Amino acid sequence: MLGWIGLVPWLAVLDRTRSWRGALAAGVVMAAAFELAVFGWFARAIQTYTGASWLIAILLLLAASPLLQPQLVTHAVARRLARARDGDPARFWTPALVAAAVYVGTEALVPKLFADTLGHGLYPSLWLRQGADVAGAHGLTFAVIVANECLLAIVHALRADPSGRRRVGATAPLGCLVAIVAVLSLYGGWRCQRLAVGDAADVTNADGSRAHVGAAMRSRAGRPLTAALVQANISHYDALRAEIGSYEAVRRILDTYVALSTEALAGASVDLLMWPETVYPTTFGSPKSEDGAAFDREIVSFVDETGIPLIFGSYDADGADEFNAAVFLEPRVATDGAPTARTFQSYRKAALFPLTERVPWLLDSDMVRRWLPWLGTWKSGAGTDVVTIVLRDGTPVRIAPLICYDVLDPRLALSAVRRGAELIVTLSNDSWFSAGPGPRMHLIGAAFLSIETRRPQLRATNTGISAVIDAAGTLLTTAAVDQRATLLATVTPSRGDPTVMVRWGDWFGPTALVAALVFFALDWTLRRGRM
């Protein structure tokens, strides 16, 4: 609800600005206030990861806020420039639409650290969020901004004539506001009708208790599969290695995940097993030591004994380059009395978190790394991969694999679904952001991928929030932050018709930006013609 009215006070402030410089200043101040209010928790993550003081982390956030929230700055300036010359706030149509277009266009042009956008705030409404399969989360953001402009215009109209004799000025914005909510609701209701109600899920906790989770949206095609997602609540591997040594750290991690997996498999018929990002904190398939080779063999033996495919996070290497990877390991099957050769597939993480995983080449030097020893050394993968695994009954499943930060780039999932992916699989490590709303925000970003592609999603994290998500973006079952749990859920891989987002890609933001630039170009040309 807050999203529909939250911008009104700031828009009223922008109405009082008298120049583009004043609007620029207002945008910068708003960016700092927004960053502090919504992402203040990130300062704690910076402090934990880098060792900097909390005050330094807060100052860094504030200093970087125009870069982290640039859409607020460009929106303020664009709105001022598009305002009618007479400054009448009731004449809101042109500045409202142009500024909203610049807002979402900026978000598309300058990717934000957490890919956050106001449209994500509509997630709690099952119907309102469904429009994301047409225009993405940015399309919903555009609707929210225009709705706020409508409310402000209504306020201006009522203030202009408190007697109530002339309410004509409020009619158009009120109609626009009602139309926005009605169109989103009607489309969402129709979409939900198209997705039949059906699937249910179970969650198994570490204490052995079971909970049945109710109805969800079922995809229209494909063979249902039951997955077990393990969240062992083990994090900060560097600290664990420093405490007990590298070998014992890997030993403890693997033993815990194998024990939880064995318990889950004993109580249910499972088709697919998932462990989270970097759960195996070394290279798989190209061991660096004899101990590493022994650990590799243990994982292989576990998969062969259970007969169930395993997806887990590990490292991958190509010469001196290392990659954050997801490994797809299938059980070895005997053919003509002899076992087949051992093969596995891997996916390399494409979107790396700035600095902690990926360092821009301009900053990547020995001197900088001596000053900041926590800088990352990963290399980016190609992304957009589709991995096919074969279940025990011989059914192939085409998977769109994503690792952590990948979910914040919709292009990866959209491209994979365009190439035939039926199911999204996400491995993540959100432990650095566990003290705050970070894991929830990351989860919502992942859920929007399922809406945009109409593909169910399996999401395994090490400390939460692990989840199973259906094609309507509904959370079928979750494991909370800092909970040790195994999730059991049945989903149906989808081979349905592609959505507008799948066909056209993340089109709305760039299109809106081009439209706004065309408006300004035409306006400038017309003004020069009158001179």
Image (cartoon, grey):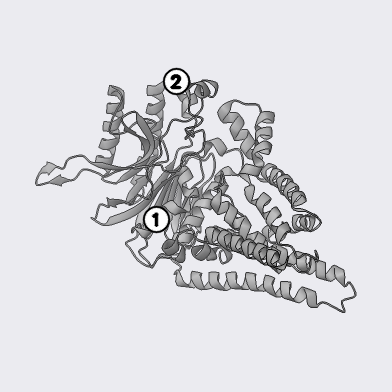
Residue denoted by label 1: 415
> Residue visible at 59% across and 25% down?
51
Secondary element at tag 1: helix
Q: Is residue 354 left or right of residue 75?
A: left
| 323 lies above or below 142 | above
Report the residue that reaches farthest toward the right.
163
| 239 lies above or below 90 | above
> Residue visible at 67% across and 29% down?
56
For residue 439, what is the image quadrant?
Answer: top right
> Residue visible at 55% across and 58% down?
509
Report the residue that reaches farthest toward the left.
336
| 426 lies above or below 506 | above
Q: 333 or 65: nearer the eye? A: 65
CA neighbours of label 1 inside 10 A, class few (<14), some (14 to 19), many (20+):
many
> Residue visible at 75% across and 65% down?
84
Estimate the spatial distance between the alpha carbons at disc 2 and disc 1, rounded to whole Å: 43 Å
Task: Find residue 306 and report its horizontal and vertical position in percent.
Answer: 27, 43
Task: Find residue 67 and report its horizontal and vertical position in percent.
Answer: 62, 43
Q: What amino acid type is highlighted by mark number 1? A: Ser
Task: Find residue 358 and report its horizontal and vertical position in percent.
Answer: 47, 35
